[in-house]
Amino acid sequence: MINNDIVSQVLLGFVSLFSNFISALSGGGAGLIQLPALLFFGLPFSKALATHKVASVALGFGASVPHFKKNSLQLKYASLILISGIPGVLLGSYTSNILPNNFSTTLLGFLTLFLSLYSIKQKKLGSSNQKISINKLRIIIGSFGLFIIGFFNGYLSSGTGLFVTIWMITIFNLSFSIAVAYTLIFVGIFWNGIGALSLGLMGNIVWSYIPILILGSLLGGYIGAYLSIIKGSRFIKFVFELVSFSVGISLLIKAFL
């Protein structure tokens, strides 16, 4: 039974603030804390996922303000994330109703752990934001990867923002701070917005929890994004490694339980 008393709302607000603050620093992983919290408060998984998706859109809006003020984003990368990723999100959302996701959850868990270990090993990963030549092959590879990540976003919904962050760094040589900005804004608002819409049409959103979750997401996203700009890529890299490792372990636990 869902408990909507004041204490639950306040606790959920703090959970939302903290989880989205961490996500804004690392470029993903809010669901690691927020989704289990919604389950703890008594929501069935389908309703918890839909409600979390709506709140995660607010994270993108909250995080966008400091990054837009810095004016460090480029239209070509934003367009690539949207044009390549959204079809994958739509396909993944459709497929999630047909195929079992236990295998994919296990695979995503191992891949997320790999992201953490890969970043730890590559000491200089994401430490620069030097311009490189963006040829057709690089665009094709980048687009294909974003489509696959978008598919997992629609299919599983957990931890995929971390993949977008590391993909943008690896393929386009962006710094951690810039890659996180693209992830938070264009994955957070547009990819998750589509997921929230599709889940909302099925009537799974618990609207009584939405105001406090949105408030926590907006504040957490703004504070986390602001701090990430101040601290720089080295600090973000450390948080990314910590969060991606935790998300990977969480996904594997979820898959085997």
Image (spheres, helix red, strand yellow):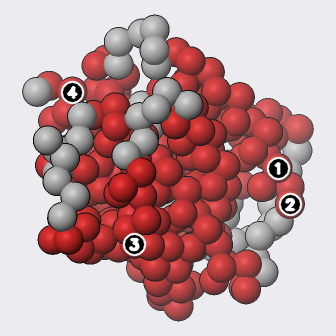
Q: Position of residue 116 (x, y in %)?
A: 35, 53
> Which mark, residue 216?
3
Q: CA distance from mark 4 to mark 3?
A: 28 Å
> Which mark, residue 255?
4
Q: Residue at x 25, y 67 (%)?
A: 9
Say what amino acid the circle numbered 1 marks: Ser
Q: CA distance from mark 2 to mark 4?
A: 37 Å
Up the image or down, 93 lies above or below 8; here it is above
Q: Position of residue 66 (x, y in %)?
A: 63, 83
Is label 2 in contact with label 4 (beta carbons under 8 Å)?
no
Up the image or down, 247 lies above or below 124; here it is above
Q: Is residue 94 visible?
A: yes
Disc 4 is placed on an element classified as helix
Q: Residue at x 14, y 25 (%)?
A: 256
Q: Of 134 and 108, which appears nearest the observer?
A: 108
Left or right of residue 81, residue 112 in this image: left
Q: CA distance from mark 3 to mark 2?
A: 29 Å
Left or right of residue 9, residue 220 in this image: right
Say what amino acid the circle numbered 2 marks: Leu
Say what amino acid the circle numbered 3 marks: Gly
Disc 1 is placed on an element classified as helix
Q: Earlier in the sequence, mark 2 or mark 4?
A: 2
Disc 2 is placed on an element classified as helix
Q: Which residue is mark 1?
A: 79
